[in-house]
Amino acid sequence: MIDLTVIWALIIAFAVLMYVVMDGFDLGIGILFPTFAPGQERDQAMNAIAPVWDGNETWLVLGGGGLFAAFPLAYAIILPATYPLIIAMLLGLVFRGVAFEFRWRDPRHRAFWDMAFFAGSLVAALAQGITLGALLQGIHVEGRAYAGGWLDWLSPYSLLTGVGVVAGYALLGSTWLAVKVEGSAEDKAYAHARRAAWATLALMAAVSLATPFLAGQYFQRWFTQPMIYWLAPVPLVTGAVAFALMRSLGARHTWRPFLLSLALFLLGMIGLGVSIWPWVVPQSISIWQAAAPHRSQVFMLVGVLAIMPLILGYTAWAYWVFRGKVGTHGYH
């Protein structure tokens, strides 16, 4: 018999991965934005994401809405535990979107809107990373409700994951710009990518070393037999991808650094999935305990099977149409 709860867990994991990958480089470009010179460099960076940035956020809606619909108990626990972070993230995304539009329509205050674009991107990325850390370190649950305080999410570990996500998004943003822009902006993109790659790898290592000691469940998953033999390839493959990424950046390849950066994020997601499975609220609520009724899952799955191909289709079409270099005078 097909386990719809597992299928829904995979759907939401896929939506989260797509959001992190696709909106990640948008946010990364915003984080790096002040390092580019006003004028052509910043215009190229902005135009590199202009056709796709709002569509990328579709995956955030799908992931959050899917969590609410398929795992309502988890939604009811996770949101109260992370309200300040979720509010900060949404405000950052809103302010960033407003800045994106207003910088073109209000030239007199373009410097202000450029800094707003940077600040909104940084706040959103940092909030997402801290939320991840708060989830991994555990949420205080009593019965079927959140029983912690307003600032339980704040810890050295959650701050570490927050900075790690910021560095990772900067890596995605810089490698995407290396594909899309020209001239001095391209040179800066490669320089930023090398620095962001070192920072991302160092922070990934730090998070990977700290996570097993958050809970016995994580430690047993990674360091007891026979799981240690099955999972040993994950850090080995991550090391190989990291080596290939640094070599590719040194050779100034076009697409390869971005694709290898995506591979790093995929491996990181796999590692996190291995650590927390099958908990949707780690150490407290499993996916089966949090799942919606079977009929609800079936009804929603029909909708997702109809909508998901459309989302993938128009996303692929948008990227195909705007596949060239931005340049200083538009796409070519």
Image (cartoon, rainbow, N blue to C red):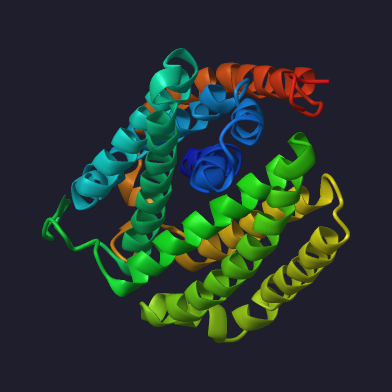
- Nearer the observer, 167 or 147: 167
Residue at x 45% of width, y 18% of height: 107
Residue 245 x/y as whole percent: 78, 62
| Residue farthest along the top direction in this orientation | 105
Position of residue 302 in the picture relative to residue 260 (left or right): left
Position of residue 124 in the picture relative to residue 251 (left or right): left
Residue 120 x/y as whole percent: 38, 39
Residue at x 70% of width, y 54% of height: 261
Residue at x 60% of width, y 86% of height: 225
| Residue farthest along the bottom direction in this orientation | 224
Q: Quadrant of residue 279?
A: bottom left
Residue 133 x/y as whole percent: 37, 62
Residue at x 84% of width, y 60% of height: 248
Residue 301 x/y as whole percent: 51, 25
Is 36 above or below relative to 307? Answer: below
Q: Quadrant of residue 324?
A: top right
**Number of marks in the image?**
0
Is 45 above or below relative to 312? Answer: below
